[in-house]
Image (spheres, rainbow, N blue to C red):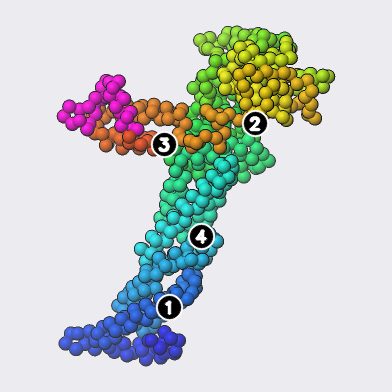
């Protein structure tokens, strides 16, 4: 047998006859075949493959070693078929799998420039398939292979985060595209190399969930990616192609634990798309909401659907207003969107002082609307509007597209050429931070509609602003862009140290959701232990976010203080519902 393993020819018929004879011979009930052949044969086999494998693995690459193992396993299977006793074959296979695979599995996985990491990186599907098939013979080795894949995904994810931070967090779409590429890469590996192995797929999901949920980055960037796609990325695509692109967003969305953070940013971006009319397609918008609804249920998307309903009803209301012949007053045509306060991500901001002609337009629309809808109340959100102004710069006429705040500031210059910061502040009553931001936007080098007396980017308390009659532009219609806010909810993606911290409004929503869940459960169960209550609350809210046990405990204490619950007198770790 040793000579045959070295490549020499062997009379296999003779071997089969001799071994068959040994099997039939028994002395004093002892098994001659086992004692005289099988035991020394297996011992020699173990020593042979121990030595050969050690030498071969030290001199060759991982793929070459696996090909050698495949060849040896095939040779030994022929040997078992041709002349070994059937009872010897499983014992032989155990030695082969132990010496050739199990004892070297870790070395093969970690082998530099040819091991698993190299195969994953270079998409060596055939080599990975070979390794998967070999390792499938040894459950422990197969689990090590799955673990190696999980660790590679986590490392790749951390590399994506590091690259993002190195770029100053300025390329959110690059980060999300990197996630999609990584996910697609391992979907193919699981299918082609791991033959659809369910445990391997589960390992991929676990690895993605671990690094995707380190902070709020992924949820925020995914919403930004979806916004770009729904604004312009889907233009010109067919229905199937567009649906495929939206499905990619859902693939990453499934990995998110804090889905409410994604919802928060998605809602902000959706509101901007709807109010500015910049969505690529209403059909795609509705398709995306339907997909989110399929993942998380009606409650998750009810506000998003409400926003669409508001826009449709606003269009109908404006059509009725135009038919009434009241949409144009003092030569000003006004377009109004009526939004339901609970649906839209709006802040409570006091309206600024509007110029007289516009104030009359607002009063006229409000009167018309409230005549049609009794019992409702209108609160004007002047910080969200836009306006088109006709401006005359020494005979050069331009149409300026500006925000409502910028319009209020510029209209003051119909009665004066120079105004101080204090005069503008008193006249328009815009919140201080927004006032300064809008003034700076009107003084940028490219769009210098106003001239600021002081130098530099900041505004001093005694600054004055004069109308720049020398302003020129090649465009007839000029959009005046806003400079980015430095803090607050309007912060840019790369501003602030806690840029990926939980938004305050999401934090508040979570408190309400946890309390509502606790009350629902206790109302049904009447009496429940602390651990059982925490587990049930976590289960109910897992489709939106994973609440921390400490946060649930705080909300329980708050409900006890407000007398919704009380501690059970017999067991202080249990709670009783108070009707």
Q: What residue would you read off at disc 2?
A: 278
Q: Which SS class for mark 3?
A: loop
Instruction: Tell which circle, 2 or 4, labels the residue nearer the N-terminal end.
Output: 4
Front residue (pair 224, 195): 224
Residue 206 at x, y percent in the picture: 42, 49
Q: Nearer the viewer, mark 1 or mark 4?
A: 1
Q: What residue would you read off at disc 1?
A: 55
Say if 516 sits above or below 116 in the image. Answer: above
Q: Nearer the viewer, mark 2 or mark 1?
A: 1
Residue 544 at x, y percent in the picture: 43, 35
For the residues bearing labels 2 and 4, Cβ distance under 8 angstroms: no
Front residue (pair 80, 481): 481
For the residues bearing labels 3 and 4, Cβ distance under 8 angstroms: no
- Dot 1 surroundings within 10 Å: few (below 14), some, or many (20 or more)? few
What residue is shown at x 21% (from left), y 87% (from top)? 26
Instruction: Tell which circle, 3 or 4, labels the residue nearer the N-terminal end.
Output: 4
Q: Is residue 254 in view?
A: yes
Say if 386 sits above or below 358 in the image. Answer: below
Snapshot quadrant of residue 214: top left
Instruction: Tell which circle, 2 or 3, labels the residue nearer the N-terminal end.
Output: 2
What residue is shown at x 41% (from left), y 87% (from top)? 4
Q: Nearer the viewer, mark 3 or mark 1?
A: 1
Q: What residue would you read off at disc 4?
A: 120
Q: Is residue 368 in view?
A: no
What residue is shown at x 19% (from left), y 89% (from top)? 27
Q: What residue would you read off at disc 3?
A: 545
Snapshot quadrant of residue 85: bottom left
Position of 209 compared to 358: left or right? left
Query: What separation in Å lies between label 1 and label 4 (alpha carbons)?
Result: 26 Å
């Amino acid at each position: 047998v040793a000579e045959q393993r070295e490549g020499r020819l062997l009379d296999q018929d003779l071997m089969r006859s001799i071994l068959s004879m040994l099997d039939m011979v028994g002395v004093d009930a002892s098994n001659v075949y086992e004692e005289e052949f099988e035991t020394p044969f297996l011992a020699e086999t173990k020593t042979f493959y121990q030595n050969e494998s050690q030498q071969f693995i030290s001199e060759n690459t991982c793929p070459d070693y696996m090909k050698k193992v495949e060849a040896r396993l095939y040779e030994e299977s022929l040997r078992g078929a041709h002349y070994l006793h059937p009872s010897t074959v499983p014992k032989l296979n155990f030695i082969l799998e132990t010496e050739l695979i199990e004892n070297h599995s870790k070395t093969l996985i970690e082998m530099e420039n040819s091991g698993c990491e190299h195969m994953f990186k270079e998409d060596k599907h055939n080599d990975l398939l070979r390794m998967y098939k070999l390792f499938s013979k040894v459950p422990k080795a197969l689990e090590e292979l799955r673990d190696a894949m999980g660790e590679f995904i986590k490392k790749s994810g951390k590399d994506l985060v590091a690259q993002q931070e190195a770029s100053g967090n300025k390329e959110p779409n690059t980060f999300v595209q990197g996630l999609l590429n990584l996910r697609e890469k391992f979907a193919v590996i699981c299918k082609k190399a791991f033959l659809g192995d369910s445990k391997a797929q589960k390992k991929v999901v676990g690895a993605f969930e671990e690094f995707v949920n380190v902070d709020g980055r992924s949820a925020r960037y995914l919403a930004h990616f979806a916004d770009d796609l729904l604004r312009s990325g889907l233009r010109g695509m067919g229905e199937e192609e567009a649906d495929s692109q939206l499905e990619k967003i859902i693939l990453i969305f499934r990995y998110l634990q804090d889905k409410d953070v994604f919802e928060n940013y998605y809602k902000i971006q959706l509101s901007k798309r709807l109010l500015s009319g910049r969505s690529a397609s209403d059909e795609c918008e509705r398709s995306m909401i339907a997909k989110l609804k399929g993942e998380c249920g009606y409650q998750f998307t009810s506000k998003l659907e409400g926003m669409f309903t508001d826009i449709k009803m606003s269009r109908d209301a404006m059509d009725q207003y135009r038919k009434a012949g009241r949409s144009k007053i003092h030569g000003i045509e006004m377009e109004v969107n009526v939004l339901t306060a609970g649906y839209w991500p709006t802040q409570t901001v006091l309206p600024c002082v509007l110029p007289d002609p516009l104030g009359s337009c607002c009063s006229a629309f409000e009167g018309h609307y409230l005549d049609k809808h009794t019992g409702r109340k209108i609160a004007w959100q002047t910080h969200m509007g836009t306006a088109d102004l006709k401006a005359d710069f020494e005979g050069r006429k331009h149409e300026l597209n500006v925000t409502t705040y910028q319009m209020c500031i510029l209209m003051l210059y119909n009665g004066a050429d120079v105004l101080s910061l204090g005069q503008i502040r008193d006249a328009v009553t815009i919140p201080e931070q927004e006032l300064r931001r809008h003034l700076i936007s009107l003084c940028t080098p490219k769009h210098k509609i106003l001239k600021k007396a002081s130098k530099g980017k900041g505004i001093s308390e005694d600054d004055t602003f004069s109308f720049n009659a020398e302003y020129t532009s090649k465009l007839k219609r000029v959009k005046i862009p806003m400079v980015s806010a430095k803090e607050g909810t309007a912060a840019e993606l790369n501003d602030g140290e806690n840029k990926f911290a939980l938004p305050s409004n999401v934090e508040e929503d979570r408190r309400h959701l946890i309390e509502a869940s606790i009350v629902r459960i206790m109302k049904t169960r009447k009496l429940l232990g602390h651990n059982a209550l925490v587990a049930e609350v976590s289960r109910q809210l897992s489709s939106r976010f994973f609440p921390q046990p400490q946060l649930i405990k705080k909300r329980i204490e708050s409900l006890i203080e407000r007398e919704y619950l009380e501690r059970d007198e017999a067991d202080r770790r249990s709670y009783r519902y108070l009707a």
